[in-house]
Image (cartoon, helix red, strand yellow):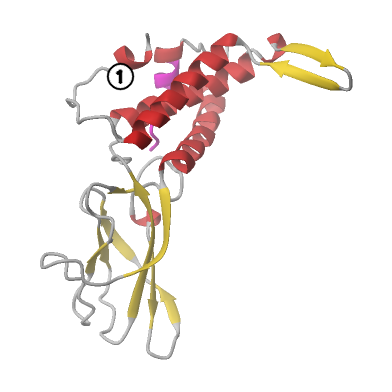
Amino acid sequence: MSYCDANDIRDIAGVTTDDMNDEKITTLISYATAQLNAQINTRIVRERVSYIDGTRENDIDGANTYFYVQWWKDFYIGDLDNDGDVDASDVIVHIVDSNGTETTATVSAVDVDNGKITLSSAPASDTRVYITYSKAPFDEDTPHFLIKKACVELSAALCFMRIDKSQINRVKLGKFTIFKQPDIFQEYYNRYMETVHQINSRSAMVVKADYDISKVISR
């Protein structure tokens, strides 16, 4: 899965099969996904599991298999491996025993909305548990329409940069050459940066599931 696909780029930006095939667009989408995640997510490294509240006790007792991350409220578990969805591969859990020996636990499930992680087996009561994950401002598994919008805009910008590279203006200033990207690249990139700002400012409200993304991007 991914935040968007080649059809989204073709529908919104008008990139045709003559301009670029699906394989190349998909490659650019993967670059866009990684860049977007880097700009909106925060990587939480080796957060130690501890008590949060009466509902999220995070007991390490040899029987409990599920644990909550500290940033469960108002945030989401995000796309750590940059593949455009959120699953068990997006969380790394290390268990350290009383002798200091460290092992990597098997994650069986991730509850993106509630910050809940389920392990395939319960850590022993004398161990410490550490979680590495990505903290996201919005749901990246569905994904939220702003996440999809940003990915489409950046992917479209990258497509037009490739398509129109022969039309790039070159201006010589002494020993230096200045490259001016085509206007359509800059237009989509500017839209992308505006959306990233909106995501990071958390100014967006929940929208209806049937929200038409084409009305948001094609303006």
* Quarter of the rendering occupied by the N terminus: top left
Left or right of residue 73, residue 15 in this image: right
Vertical placement of residue 39 versus 182, above or below: below
Vertical placement of residue 60 versus 183, above or below: below
At which x and y percent is residue 200? 37, 36
Of 24 and 187, which appears nearest the observer?
A: 187
Task: Find residue 166 and report its image quarter.
Answer: top right
- Residue reaching furthest right? 175
Task: Find residue 72 and report its image quarter.
Answer: bottom left
At which x and y percent is residue 149? 37, 25
Q: Which residues are magenta?
A: 1-10
Vertical placement of residue 95 versus 47, above or below: below
Specify the amino acid type for callout 1.
Ile
> Is residue 99 something one can see in this rendering?
yes
Q: Which residue is mark 1?
A: 213
Residue drawn at (34%, 74%), measured in percent from left and top? 129
Task: Find residue 89 and report its image quarter.
Answer: bottom left
Label 1 secondary element: helix
Left or right of residue 148, residue 210 in this image: left
At which x and y percent is residue 25? 52, 25
Residue drawn at (50%, 25%), measured in percent from left and top? 155
Q: Is residue 8 magenta?
A: yes
Q: Residues within 10 Å of mark 1 (few under 14, many from 20)?
A: some
